[in-house]
């Protein structure tokens, strides 16, 4: 059985994190996407680009990060990285990278704030590769937990995973 995670052609994934939180970037190479925003308090950026009724229907990157609303800053670093690579929507003599993002709540440290920032988002994009993709407590999965509805004492450690389907 082959347990190697195989990405579709042109897709790369990168992670960056500290001991508390992180960001995961999927460089999408203009892939067509879709979106279904769920949860009691979703935090997103530019996910409407992925709705079927929008003119673009594709993105250059998707960012997943911790940090709750503070973590939305991570996508600014990804936009900067893509601009430097001249990847994005051509707008005259400018390029506008199309980056969608979703965040998770991982503000788990008492009396401190740890969240992904622009620098961490940039690093995750720069680290993107198609080989040796890691899952679990890495990138956006570092501080991820599940089962918080009854409070942090009832939560369980989680992480980040992936799946692909080839038709």
Image (spheres, rainbow, N blue to C red):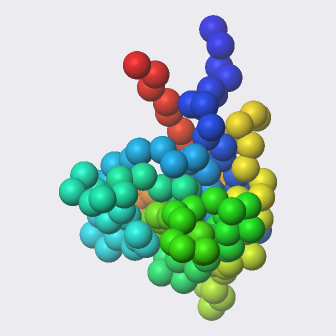
Mark count: 0
Q: Is residue 39 left or right of residue 129?
A: left
**Residue 135 versus residue 127: which sits nearer the camera?**
127
Q: Residue at x 60, y 74 (%)?
A: 94
Q: Residue furthest front?
A: 92
Note whether 142 is above or below 94 in the view shown.
above
Q: Residue at x 43, y 72 (%)?
A: 45
Q: Quadrant of the C terminus?
A: top left
Residue 125 appearing in the image: yes
Q: Quadrant of residue 74?
A: bottom right
Residue 138: horizontal and vertical position, in percent?
Answer: 69, 53
Q: Residue at x 35, y 70 (%)?
A: 42
Residue 75 appearing in the image: no
Residue 48: horizontal and vertical position, in percent?
Answer: 32, 65
Residue 135: horizontal and vertical position, in percent?
Answer: 65, 42
Q: Quadrant of the N terminus?
A: top right
Q: Residue furthest bottom?
A: 111
Note whether 106 is above or below 14 in the view shown.
below
Q: Residue furthest top?
A: 1
Q: Residue at x 60, y 31 (%)?
A: 9
Q: Quadrant of residue 109?
A: bottom right
């Amino acid at each position: 059985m082959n347990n190697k995670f195989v990405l579709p052609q042109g897709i790369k994934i990168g992670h960056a994190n500290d001991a508390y939180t992180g960001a995961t970037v999927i460089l999408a190479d203009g892939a067509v996407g879709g979106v279904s925003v769920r949860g009691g308090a979703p935090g997103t950026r530019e996910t409407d680009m992925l709705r079927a009724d929008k003119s673009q229907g594709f993105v250059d990157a998707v960012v997943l990060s911790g940090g709750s609303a503070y973590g939305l800053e991570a996508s600014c670093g990804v936009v900067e990285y893509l601009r430097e690579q001249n990847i994005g929507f051509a707008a005259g003599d400018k390029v506008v990278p199309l980056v969608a993002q979703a965040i998770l709540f991982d503000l788990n440290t008492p009396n401190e704030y740890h969240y992904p920032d622009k620098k961490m988002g940039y690093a995750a994009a720069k680290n993107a590769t198609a080989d040796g993709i890691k899952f679990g407590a890495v990138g956006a999965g570092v501080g991820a937990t599940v089962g918080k509805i009854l409070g942090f004492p009832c939560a369980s450690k989680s992480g980040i995973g992936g799946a692909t389907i080839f038709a």
